[in-house]
Amino acid sequence: MHAVQLPVIGAVAAWRAQARGFLWDGIRPEEIDWRGGGTLFDTLSPPNAVPRAGASYSVGKAALSAIETALSHSDPDRYARAYQVLWRMAHERLRFGDRSDPQMRKLLDQAKAVRRDIHKMHAFVRFREGPGHGNRRAFAAWFEPEHPIVEAATPFFAKRFGDMDWVIATLILTATFKDGTLSFKETSDTTPPPEDATEDLWCTYYASIFNPARLMTHAMQSEMPKKYWKNLPEARLIPDLVHGAHARSRAMQEAAPTQPPAFFEAIARAEGRVAGAPIHGGLAGLKAQAARCARCELACHATQLVWGEGPENAPLMVVGEQPGDQEDLQGRPFVGPAGQLLREVAQNAGLDLRQAYVTNAVKHFKFRPRGRRRIHQRPNTGEVIACKWWLDLELRHVKPRLTLALGATAARALTGDGGAIRERRGRIETGHHGGHVMITMHPSYLLRLPEEDKALAMQAFVEDISRAAAHVEAHRANQDGR
């Protein structure tokens, strides 16, 4: 049995040196007794394994970093566990990061806890100024970390506050930075440094930036746990700030202007974005406004705007994705192959599309040139959102009893969700505008299917179109019967 007494200061480096030697000599984990918190190395019995000439093992940078970070945890078994993981990675093909392995998972969780503790130390150390020497100011701080992280966490302060001298004391170790040199010693005095004159100024600043309208106590305590409060000068302000947050928030609301400045309204009007603005000229007026739209870059490349067509009081609105090549050239929706298929299926299902308002979620053709051809490209989320402004105005004006969404892009524009079209097809959902939305496949999808899959998909599409026609007809009958 090999007993290794690791020092209080420099334990990680000492463990690394010993672990490397044991690994090369083939010493198994159960043959080592790792002991932390001592002052020297003490090997009680000589290695009984024959050194393996030429043995060589390599550990990736990420693995070594995680292992050594976990060594700063407070778990007394951390040294033994780290060597066991290292041994198994070298001899048993244990893969680094495999969380299905209990030892690996424990090590990774402890490394994560140490990183979080280091982050909290960086955030919550509060220095207090003391007497300096020469042209360097001097500061001191007291901190109580959850794990022995002083050696791992304090190089951050040496880089950030390299022009001053400072001391950070904890229950176990004290870090001293003097004249540009960082050193460590065991803590002998556990008395926190006295308050200084800057703490009142800091508390005044903290109280002034506290926003009562954005108070979320659970989130605040998650980022600033109460166990750190006793060493934070601003923490004594928090109970009163939280208690008065509601009243201060209400006072801010009452003091806010009741109307936006006139220049905001002027800018919005120039862009055609005034919420609730009256629609002048009906759908024709909207079309004229949309022809000058610059809300996204699609208008710069397309031939022309492709606006919706149909009666202004149509009971059914059909929304596709975007114009295709033929629609872009003719300036009319659904005149290409997908549109022809839609009209054919609608006619067979007893739906007269001449009585429906037909449009697209995006009003300009997005494409990628390939020789003399223009290859269709699906609009991205930003383009769908930008064009949703016009689609919402169409919905507000037409007020359809049912909106038929063809494909994922139309579903996203109308309901906010463009996923799982096959599972959702044929169902009635509630759209952003508060009306009924039925989702089905886009006819261009059917045109791309191989012949062996097309029959079933076509049957489902016909069923959806028939269901949409029946829904509109039932609603019309209910209206006529009143």
Image: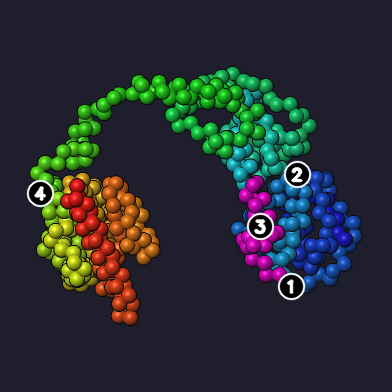
Residue 274 in the image, given as x and y percentages of width and height: 21, 37
Which comes sooner in the sequence, label 2 or label 3?
Answer: 2
How far apart are the alpha carbons under marks 2 and 3?
27 Å
Residue type, mark 2 in image = Ile
* Front residue (pair 166, 459): 459
Residue for point 33% across, 77% down: 453
Q: CA distance from mark 4 to mark 1?
A: 84 Å
* Residue on which disc 1 sits: 54
CB atoms at circles 2 and 4 under 8 Å apart? no
Segment tinted magenta in the rendering: 92-114
| Disc number lying in front (4 or 1) | 4
| Mark 3 element type | helix
In the rendered structure, are the residues bearing label 3 and label 4 in contact, judged by CB atoms less than 8 Å apart?
Answer: no
Please, what is the three-letter code of the amino acid marked with disc 3? Answer: Arg
For marks 2 and 4, give the CA distance. 80 Å
For the N terminus, give its image quadrant.
bottom right
The amino acid type, in three-letter code, at marker 4 is Ala
Tag 4 or tag 2, which sits nearer the N-term?
A: 2
Q: Where does the image place residue 249, in percent across and percent down from the top left?
A: 43, 25
Residue 317: percent from left, percent from top = 21, 56
Total number of numbered labels? Answer: 4
Front disc: 2 or 4:
4
Q: Earlier in the sequence, mark 3 or mark 1?
A: 1
Q: Is residue 214 visible?
A: yes
**N-terminal of the two: label 4 or label 1?**
1
Q: Quadrant of residue 427?
A: bottom left
User: What residue sits 35% from the left and 21% below the top?
Assistant: 255
Please name the residue that numbered disc 3 is placed on: 105
Which of pointers 2 and 3 indicates the residue nearer the eye? Answer: 3
User: Residue at left 16%, top 38%?
Assistant: 278
- Which secondary structure, mark 4? helix
Cα distance in 3D space between marks 3 and 1: 31 Å
